[in-house]
Image (cartoon, rainbow, N blue to C red):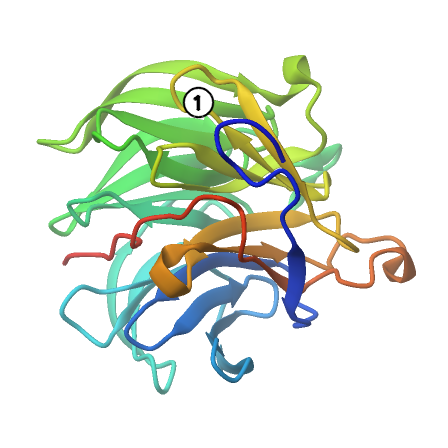
């Protein structure tokens, strides 16, 4: 890693060898000192105790794309299949189904995040592959506010990472298959987007892999997981310049990242073991990694407000 005060030689540790098929959606919860995360293919919500490195797994009825704590409640918000649901964090029971999207399409929720006002942004993707691979342009990015679901970006293939600028004037969004990070003008007052632009193009930048999950740090920089690329890259949110590359040892399919731990100074990284041809060459696939000395830190992640 290099530039902008970041540690040029950070240490990447395998924190938990979870053997996840598709580990995703990490969310640090300070009051419990737990890292919440999902294994999409195993249909589980997980709670990793950072003091003991013990993991509790909770089974769900369908593929679960994300989990986000709910402000003022012990319940969790989860994307289960194409449903937005409130889930009991102790039993895994579905407390309430808030919405269902995408009609009869064979889709599922993938990544999601809340803005600083607690509005949910969540996107979908096709469940199955078509004749020539993954069914393209079948997903949609939705916003969910006050019980209303609004389709905002149609025709996406793998709806993925989300983030906002520090002043909430920009929203960043990833559709993995075009290998692009997009930027939008963000109206924080009403939670609407406009003026979509390509912010980072992995193809023209010659970045490896496909952009996947994303988080931001206290300087507003974007940290992007590279599925198939074996790394997390850091980008200047104003210029789009690549500032750093953090290689993840023994794993290629890097799925997402978030800041947490003491003073939100640790960077947690998730990955998957599914779609790996030779696991002997990727012994850490499906694990959760931590970087404790990146040279920056994050802000508390936003929770869902009903």
Question: In x, y percent, where is residue 215?
Answer: 43, 43
Which residue occupies the foreground of this view, 280 or 262?
Answer: 262
- Looking at the picture, how far across and down is residue 170, in whole percent? 28, 25
Q: Looking at the rendering, which quadrant does residue 270 occupy? A: bottom right
Secondary structure at numbered mark 1: strand
Q: Position of residue 45 (x, y in %)?
A: 47, 72
Task: Left or right? Give the position of 6 relative to 140.
Answer: right
Q: What x and y, as percent, mark residue 145?
A: 16, 46
Q: Which residue occupies 20% across, 46% down? A: 119
- Residue 219 in view here: yes
How many numbered marks appear?
1
Q: Who is closer to the viewer here, 239 or 81?
A: 239
Seen from the viewer's position, the closer of residues 149 and 165 is: 165
Q: Residue at x 45, y 33 (%)?
A: 222
Report which residue position mark 1 lands on: 182
Could you tell whether 165 is left or right of 179 in the image? left
Quarter of the picture containing the N terminus is: top right
Q: Is residue 226 above or below residue 242?
A: below
Q: Is residue 14 above or below residue 143?
A: below
Answer yes or no: is residue 107 visible.
Answer: no
Q: Is 197 displayed left or right of 232 in the figure?
A: left
Q: Determine the residue positioned at 17% across, 33% down.
A: 191
At a point 82% along the width and 63% down the height, the residue shown is 283
Crowd rating for badge 1 (residues with CA inside 10 Å; few <14, some 14–19, many 20+): some
Q: Is residue 153 above or below residue 265?
A: above
Placement of the C terminus among the 4 image quadrants: bottom left
Quarter where residue 152 is shown: top left
């Amino acid at each position: 890693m290099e530039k902008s005060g970041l540690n040029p030689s950070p240490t990447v540790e395998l924190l938990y060898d979870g053997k996840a098929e598709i580990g995703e959606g990490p969310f640090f919860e300070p009051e419990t000192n737990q890292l919440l995360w999902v294994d999409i293919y195993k249909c589980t919500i997980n709670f990793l105790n950072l003091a003991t490195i013990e993991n509790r797994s909770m089974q769900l009825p369908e593929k679960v794309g994300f989990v986000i704590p709910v402000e003022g409640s012990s319940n969790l918000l989860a994307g289960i299949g194409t449903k937005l649901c409130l889930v009991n964090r102790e039993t895994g029971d579905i407390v309430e189904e808030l919405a269902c999207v995408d009609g009869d399409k064979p889709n599922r929720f993938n990544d999601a995040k809340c803005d600083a006002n607690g509005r949910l942004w969540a996107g979908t993707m096709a469940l199955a592959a078509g004749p020539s691979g993954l069914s393209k342009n079948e997903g949609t990015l939705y916003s969910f506010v006050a019980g209303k679901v609004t389709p905002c970006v149609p025709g996406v293939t793998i709806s993925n990472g989300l983030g906002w600028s520090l002043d909430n004037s920009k929203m960043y969004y990833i559709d993995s298959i075009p290998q692009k990070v997009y930027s939008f003008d963000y109206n924080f007052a009403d939670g609407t987007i406009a003026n979509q632009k390509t912010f980072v193009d992995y193809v023209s930048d010659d970045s490896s892999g496909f952009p996947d999950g994303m988080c931001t740090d206290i300087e507003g920089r974007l940290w992007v997981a590279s599925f198939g690329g074996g790394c997390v890259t850091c980008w200047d949110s104003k210029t789009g310049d690549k500032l750093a590359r953090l290689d993840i040892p023994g794993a290629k399919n890097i799925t997402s990242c978030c800041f947490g731990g003491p003073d939100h100074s640790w960077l947690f990284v998730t990955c998957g073991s599914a779609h790996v041809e030779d696991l002997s060459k990727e012994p850490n696939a499906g694990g959760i990694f931590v970087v404790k000395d990146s040279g920056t830190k994050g802000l508390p992640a936003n929770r869902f407000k009903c």
